[in-house]
Image: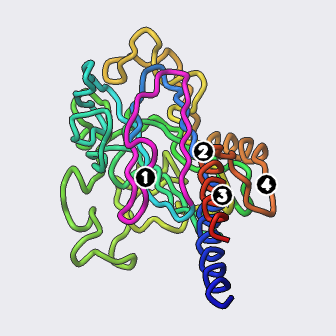
Amino acid sequence: MALFSGGHHSITTIFSFILLVFIQGVTAATFTFNNRCDYTVWPGILANPGSLKLESTGFELTKGSSRSFQAPTGWAGRFWGRTGCNFDDSGRGSCTTGDCGSGEIECNGAGAIPPATLAEFTLGSGSQDFYDVSLVDGYNLPMIVEGNGGSGECATTGCLTDLNKKCPSELRIDGGAACKSACDAFGKPEYCCSGAYNSPAACKPSMYSQVFKSACPKSYSYAFDDATSTFTCSGSDYTITFCPNVPSLKSSKDPSPTTAEATGSDPVPDPMQESALTSQWLANLATGDCPRIRPFSLLRFGFVVTIFLALSLFL
């Protein structure tokens, strides 16, 4: 009888653990990517060390399309958009900006080659998520991040301005498809916040980071730009939108972002307009007191039921 009780306790413990894994999967955050550019964007995804790889590490997102992924609680990583890509039928090729150097559509654990606009996330395990849009590695296209259905501040952040139009000549890459950071362009410690400048007290905004900050006040402009650039939310899904402005920043006559001509009037708002637009978006964000329950997975549920039935044979 004691042996039976011990076995029952062990089986119950195992089943409880499996059920916990199942519940954690259900409460994952969903990332949705929207492409409002007048050209195809190839998002890249890089998970931080220790975080699980998502369903894809790089994919094609045509004009006007969207795609969603689920990530477990505790996941951390970054997203970015690659532009001017040319891949053959076998998926081999490269991109003009944001290329990850894998030679494939999938980035396979490689990050963006600067310059690239980055969206960075650390999802809390039952606590706050942290997220930001960073121009520390430069800029290649407009991007915003919106929180949906969470509780807390959950502010919309990102860069609406086309910085390629305002990029100082010494930071502009050939063809004007992207804008380097001063660190990438010059490699000096005072721009990279390295060496003797590796502290908030020593590394101050440069004339170049101030250009970025003026155009995109909610984005990271240099390494220690934390106070106005990091945001938090709890129990939220997130939408990452490329080229969020309407009308689009590029002409529909030429789908290539490296050669497309700008439209006659510049639709990009100034910082005051950006703030007003962000406030309008924030007013539409839903908030709640509890984390959301994520889409139900029949496959995961079937697996748990199968394990339960198998274990019940031993009771």
User: Which of marks 1 and 4 precedes in the sequence?
Assistant: 1
How busy is the neighbourhood of tag 2: few (under 14 within 10 Å), some, or many (20 plus)?
few
Q: Which residue is labeled 3 in the image? A: 309
Judge whether residue 127 can be spotted in this image: no
Give the magenta part as a residue range. 45-72
Question: What's the residue type where badge 2 is placed?
Answer: Leu
Left or right of residue 6, residue 223 in this image: left
Query: At numbered mark 2, what does the secondary structure look like: helix, strand or loop?
Result: helix
Q: Nearer the viewer, mark 2 or mark 3?
A: 3
Residue visible at 69% across and 50% down in the picture: 294
Q: Main secondary structure of the magenta part?
A: loop
Closest to the observer, 19 or 124: 19
Left or right of residue 129, residue 118 in this image: left
Query: At numbered mark 1, what does the secondary structure look like: helix, strand or loop?
Result: strand
Give above or below for 267 relative to 10. Answer: above
User: Which of marks 1 and 3 precedes in the sequence?
Assistant: 1
Judge whether residue 29 can be spotted in this image: yes
Instruction: Give me the C-alpha separation between circle 3 and circle 1.
Output: 40 Å
Q: Nearer the viewer, mark 3 or mark 4?
A: 3
Question: What's the residue type where badge 4 is placed?
Answer: Thr
Residue visible at 68% across and 63% down in the picture: 234
Q: Which residue is labeled 2 in the image? A: 299
Q: Position of residue 38 (x, y in %)?
A: 48, 20
- The stretch drawn in magenta includes residue 50: yes
Question: What's the residue type where badge 1 is placed?
Answer: Arg
Label of residue 287 in the image = 4
How busy is the neighbourhood of tag 4: few (under 14 within 10 Å), some, or many (20 plus)?
some
